[in-house]
Image (cartoon, rainbow, N blue to C red):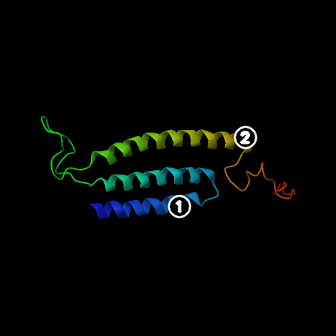
Amino acid sequence: MEVAVAVLTGLYFAVSIYLMLSQHIIRILLGTVTLSTGANLTIFAMGRITREVPPIIPDGRYLPAEGAANALPQALVLTAIVIAFSLFAFLLVLVMRSYQELGTDDTEAMRDAEPRGEPLPPLGY
């Protein structure tokens, strides 16, 4: 099971890097989301993936049963999912607003701050 998750995680990272190297900003946004999913899978796989023993502490005991999965990575992944979703929503609104303002999602065409052909600002003190 861990091998399949490792291969899937590598696939997520490869796809995210491919998307983030694009010039279109919506692909960069989707690459960011895919990268966070790959990171979440990495954290989840580090907590031992088992289906036999749930990470629940029975009544009267202080420790989970032997061989249980670690619950801390699962809690971290749940928190990371919420943070990634809020980041995605913020970036999506930012991309939509820039598209409305500039009329393009191409990063090369979005050069209002650094237009081509103008001299460089002073680079030293």
In the image, taking residue 23 as reference, residue 48 lies left or right, namely: left
Q: Which residue is mark 2?
A: 101
Q: Residue at x 66, y 50 (%)?
A: 105
Q: CA distance from mark 2 to mark 1?
A: 27 Å
Q: Residue at x 22, y 45 (%)?
A: 55
Measured along the vertical axis of the image, is residue 21 above or below residue 65?
below
Residue type at mark 1 is Ile
Q: Residue furthest left?
A: 60
Secondary element at tag 1: helix
Where residue 99 sits, quadrant-wise, is top right
Give the percent coordinates (x, y) of residue 92.
57, 42
In contact (CB < 8 Å): disc 2 and disc 1: no
Point out the tag, 2 or 1, that comes first from the N-terminus. 1
Screen quadrant of the C terminus? bottom right
Badge 2 local density, few (<14 within 10 Å), some, or many (20+)? few
Q: Residue furthest front?
A: 125
Residue type at mark 2 is Glu
Disc number lying in front (2 or 1): 1
Q: Residue at x 86, y 59 (%)?
A: 117
Q: Which residue is mark 1?
A: 17
Q: Nearer the viewer, residue 19 or 120?
A: 120
Q: Nearer the viewer, residue 72 or 112?
A: 72
In the image, taking residue 87 as reference, residue 68 lies left or right, namely: left
Where residue 107 sits, quadrant-wise, is bottom right
Give the percent coordinates (x, y) of residue 109.
74, 53
In the image, taking residue 61 as reference, residue 42 lies left or right, namely: right
